[in-house]
Image (cartoon, rainbow, N blue to C red):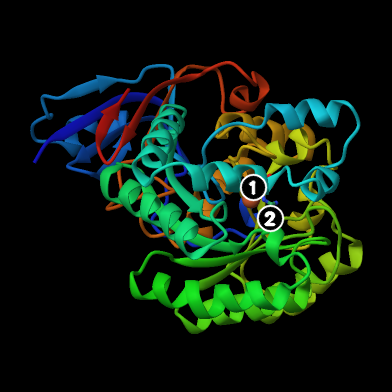
Amino acid sequence: MQSLLLTHIKLLLNTRSEAHALYGSQMREVPRLDNAWLLIEGCEIADFGSMDTIEQDFSQLPENRMDCSGRLVLPAWCDSHSHIVFTGSRENEMVDKIHGLGYAEINAKGGGILNTVQKINEISESELFDESWKRLEAVARTGTGAIEIKSGYGLSLEGELKMLRVIRRLKEKSSLEIRSSFLGAHTFPMAFRSNHAAYIKQITEEMLPVIAKEKLADYIDVFCEQGFFNPEESETILRSGMSFGLLPKIHVNQLHAIGGIQTALRVNAVSMDHLEHMPEEEIALIKKSGWKGICTLLPTAAFFLRMPFPPARKLIESGCAIALASDYNPGSSPSGNMNIVYAMSCIQMSMLPEEALNAATINGAHAMGLGDVCGSVSRGMLANLIITQPVPSLAYLPYSFGSNLIDKVILRGNLIG
Ligand code: NIG
Ligand code: FE
């Protein structure tokens, strides 16, 4: 088995023996080792310790070594909400927005999600794979080691299967850990705008049985929002997905609070994602419910759509577990760079660098069922690591937003580049 020893690590971050999700004030703690070594064997983190005891720790030092003087080593980002499988771009909508059009108005015009749906339906599965593969490789170079990917730009049996099969091929070929979500309920296709029941029937009776049979998705997701799926429709779809063995996730309170939080609590969602519009009563409701899922916040989507940022501080103060994710998609977050997500959550959402680090690693991993596989520096976990440039501190990473401070990325024990 191939070994690699990282030596003289200035700060080894998020070292844990047990990696449960972190709630409320637990998110402030980032266990760390100064002046550390870390041993990778095969695809796993075999061990780590202090440079002060390296001579005692090894009878013979492995030959393959890398000096990490001045550098931080941290778990690779765990991006638990993305739509990275898409085609084309929608910069024209950005210009429409500059001219004053709203997100919902663009959607009503047949733009928005439906614009990408049309493009997806025009290309082949292999073209979609090639385009998505390039994007996946690019986010890996910016430090992402695990990613959840949603369907939702097909909106027909054929289109959704095309997307989910692309995600499956990415899972098989990529060194990133990938989880997939079926988001047939992303929006209503034009033909079903006045017959919601018929489209929901298509999702539950035509799409879900095939998706479940081919094991194409881990999660069922819904865009619960005014003008999209209302709370009752969302619950029907989530419960149907659950009856096929998929776990529920939900896009909720992005634009309005319409009762989706209550739906999420009723189905015991694994995660509630977005939460830009959170009335105090709904934060209190989450607290009172004792729900143990994860609030996934997507600051780059709020930034790109010029929305209020989600109330991270209030959620943390009421004891929630926060994950940070990119929402990478052509409409509301055309970037999958988790370093920007990290910086924005500190600068605009007042998350502490430690809280945001946990949110973008360990809690992100939990939001996609990968808490035992990656997201922390633990013995036996995947060696998915970021090695930074020489930097003075952890806080320097979000502080110098926009500069590339990643020197190397290791996924499954291999340097990528
Ligand atoms: O998470 N909110 C719904 N879906 C995406 C946007 C998708 C699109 O505009 O293409 C989101 O922001
Ligand atoms: Fe999304």
Which image quarter holds the C terminus?
Answer: top left
Q: Position of residue 326 (x, y in %)?
A: 60, 41
- Residue at 64%, 27% (x, y): give it: 398
Q: Give left or right: position of 166 versus 329.
A: left
Q: Is mark 2 within 8 Å of ligand 2?
A: no
Is disc 1 surrounded by few (<14), some (14 to 19) or many (20+) residues within 10 Å?
some
Q: Is mark 1 within 8 Å of ligand 2?
A: no
Residue nearest the observer in this picture, 194 or 309: 194
Label 2: state its secondary structure: helix
Query: Pointer 1: what residue?
Result: 28
Establish if 90 lies above or below 48. Answer: above
Q: Position of residue 167 (x, y in %)?
A: 39, 51
- Answer yes or no: is residue 30 visible: no
Query: Pointer 2: what residue?
Result: 25
Q: Quadrant of residue 389?
A: top left
Could you give the CA–CA distance between mark 1 and mark 2, rounded to whole angstroms?
6 Å
Label 1: state its secondary structure: helix
**Amino acid type indicated by mark 2:** Ser
- Answer yes or no: is residue 390 visible: yes
Which image quarter holds the N terminus?
Answer: top left
Establish if 201 lies above or below 1. Answer: below
Residue nearest the observer in this picture, 329 or 288: 329
Q: Give left or right: position of 1 versus 99.
A: left
| Image marks 1 and 2: residues in contact by CB distance under 8 Å | yes
- Residue at 74%, 47% (x, y): give it: 110
Residue nearest the observer in this picture, 122 or 321: 122
**Amino acid type indicated by mark 1:** Arg
- Residue at 64%, 72% (x, y): give it: 199
Q: Position of residue 186 (x, y in %)?
A: 64, 59
Q: How many marks?
A: 2
Establish if 48 lies above or below 219. Answer: above
Q: Position of residue 337 (x, y in %)?
A: 55, 31
